[in-house]
Amino acid sequence: MNYIIMDLEWNNTYCKKKKGFMNEIIEVGAVKLSSDLKVVDTFSVFIKAQLGKKLHARVKELTNITNDDISTGTPFSQAMAKFRKWVGNEENIILTWGDTDIRVMIENFRYFNGISFIPFLSNYVNLQKYAQAFMNISKAEQIGLAAAAEKLGLSPERYTLHRALDDSRLTADLFKRIFNKQMLDSYTLVCDTSFYSKITFKPKAIVDINSPLIDKSKMKCLCDVCGASCERISDWRLTNQSFRAIFLCKKCKRKIRFTIRFKEYYDRIDIKSSSVPFIEKKEIKNIVAVESSGNSSEEQE
């Protein structure tokens, strides 16, 4: 079993064919580890830019990659053929820090090679997700590579960050410190049809209130003071991809603004809601007027 730690650098550029922007890969770096975590080999290649001939200023600043580097690089299809040969036929797991690199590589294979899969990807681990679980870090935190490395006693400044090969080296050193075969197996995904369906699915907010994906039982508001069920006294309005309505707690005689958002993911519907006291516009004006009056009195004193 080999472990292939891979990292990409890319340039966001406008694609006339797609009539939109896409992330064009400009560099691939990787480290190959043996089953006992010894470095077997490394891989590095610049990709010849075919869409964006010039790098964004921020990309140049972060990576120190130049326009000359991407103008004289290897075309994507040829570079991927070389990388596939380098990966080899031995059983392996490809690991990246977060799954964005995999999404970008799929996008590039689709555009340049006309296929919607990565030929050399058979088993995959999102190392960021694995590391956060290993280090007991909340999923919501989304810790970066450098921060995670520092927590594990590594010195990111020893590596040239935001360059594909050095990022791969840092990730490989981090991986060695948190390696647990049994735990890693539970985070290893087989790259079959369902894997590609899930990883390429784009989450989206549900903005049709009549959608069958919406659980109407969740669109109820409880008073945050007494816990009683409130009565809706306004129509639902769509605001910032969330549904919003005014509710009345008859027990407390309070109006509450209730907001709920439904977001569709590949395998679930994420629901977030919030409640805040509702203040009428005329009440806000009165509050402002009182505060202004108070300030004037203080100034006179």
Image (tube, rainbow, N blue to C red):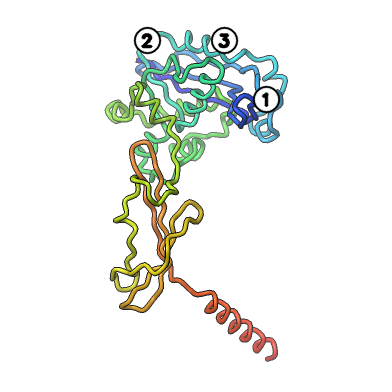
Q: Amino acid at mark 3?
A: Gln
Q: Amino acid at mark 1?
A: Gly
- How dense is the environment of label 2, judged by Cα within 10 Å: few (below 14), some, or many (20 and up)? few
Residue 55, given in percent of the width and then of the height, sits at 69, 28
Q: Secondary structure at mark 3?
A: helix
Tell me, for residue 52, which label it has, or none.
1
Nearer the observer: mark 2 or 1; the answer is 1
Residue 22, given in percent of the width and then of the height, sits at 59, 29
In the image, residue 39 above or below residue 221: above
The residue singled out by tag 2 in the image is 90
Q: Earlier along the polypeptide chain: callout 3 or callout 2? A: 3
- How dense is the environment of label 3, judged by Cα within 10 Å: few (below 14), some, or many (20 and up)? few
Quadrant in the picture for the N terminus: top left
Instruction: From the viewer's perspective, tell me whether residue 152 is left or right of residue 20.
Output: left
* Residue nearest the viewer, comparing 234 with 33: 234
Quadrant in the picture for the C terminus: bottom right
Q: Secondary structure at mark 1?
A: loop
- How dense is the environment of label 1, judged by Cα within 10 Å: few (below 14), some, or many (20 and up)? many
Nearer the observer: mark 1 or 3; the answer is 1
User: Outermost residue, bottom direction?
Assistant: 301
Instruction: Give me the C-alpha separation between circle 1 and circle 3.
Output: 18 Å
At 34% from the left edge and 78% from the top edge, which residue is drawn? 252
Instruction: Give me the C-alpha separation between circle 3 and circle 2.
Output: 21 Å
Residue 285, given in percent of the width and then of the height, sits at 58, 78
Q: Earlier along the polypeptide chain: callout 2 or callout 1? A: 1
Q: Quarter of the image holding residue 245?
A: bottom left
Q: Amino acid at mark 2?
A: Glu
Tell me, for residue 78, which label it has, or none.
3
Instruction: From the viewer's perspective, tell me whether residue 35 is left or right of residue 80.
Output: left
Q: Earlier along the polypeptide chain: callout 1 or callout 3? A: 1
